[in-house]
Amino acid sequence: MDRRGALKVLLAGGCSLLGGSLTEPRAARGESTQRMPAIFLAHGSPMLLDDAHWVAELHQWAGSLPRPKAILMLSAHWEQMPIALGATTRVPLVYDFYGFPSKYYEVKYPAPGAPELAARVSDLLAGSEGLVVPTERGLDHGAYVPLVAMYPQADVPVLQVSLPALDPRVLFRLGRSFAPLRSEGVLIVGSGFLTHNLRALDLRPQPTTPSWAKDLDSWAADVLQRRDVDALLDYRKRAPGVDRALPTHEHFVPVIAALGAAVDSSDRTTFPISGFIAGSLTRRSVQFG
């Protein structure tokens, strides 16, 4: 057996966790046979789950979508090259934050693993990205926090994939590689923040949103609505306020992968959630298709 065959056997090891036979029709398992959108969501912090309004917005958004067969998650909180695949069985979450009250380290999200999806992703990336590394890494807070709000029953299989780089072109190409999954019932999710300067947080009851945050948020909304790929890929030079809004770039770039997964479709772009939190953090979330 060659290396790719061995990898597929390894990734397929827990297929029973998908909640039904792989040959059983999706409709019989309550899963979508429609093409799924690709989305980008602002994932907040572990405290998002204390915000009843935000939780309700995320839950309502999920309810408006066809039910996914599985979720492919790209979170700002996992960068690794070669591309790595998260655990395909239930493993502990990754509490990748520090200094929070103990209750935030007690949150559980026992979603099934997605070995079938992992094998499919490995195949899709074999030609363009080369080696794909399976791991036993659990979901980080950029993945599980919004999913607790969106799919609180934790009954949709989830596969997290690492960001191989912060280069917009690399991530756009990665998203395009994932595009076929949309027609296979997979919800592709980029998770981050379009603005993310933690030193600029305003925690007063009625915070002020600085102009640089408003400017970048408005620019991003326009570029994403028009699907202006050239502008998005060149955002570090073109986006107003980018140096203040994004001291680092890992939270912005998942939106590029999400657009890459949907760029060849004519479906419209919508913003199911918008507004700001803590002054400068935009909650703008995006649905492509």
Image: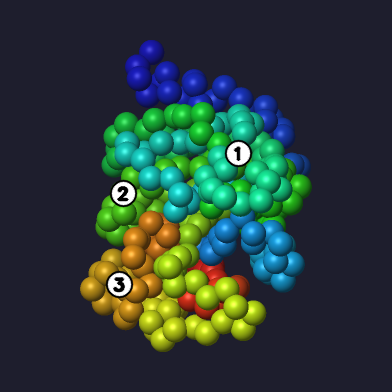
User: Horizontally, is 107 left or right of 94 in the view?
Assistant: right
Label 2 sits on residue: 165
Label 1 sits on residue: 93
Q: Distance between the residues labelled 3 and 1?
A: 32 Å
Q: Which of marks 2 and 3 is in front?
A: 3
Return the residue found at the far left: 237
In this view, 9 is above or below 150: above
Mark toward the start of the polypeptide (2 vs 1)? 1
Q: Which amino acid does label 3 sit on?
A: Asp
Front-lying residue, 229 or 93: 93
In this view, 287 is above or below 104: below
Residue 152 percent coordinates (x, y): 74, 51
Label 3 sits on residue: 243
Residue 104 percent coordinates (x, y): 66, 49
Neighbours of disc 3 within 10 Å: few (<14), some (14-19), many (20+): some
Q: Nearer the viewer, mark 2 or mark 1?
A: 1
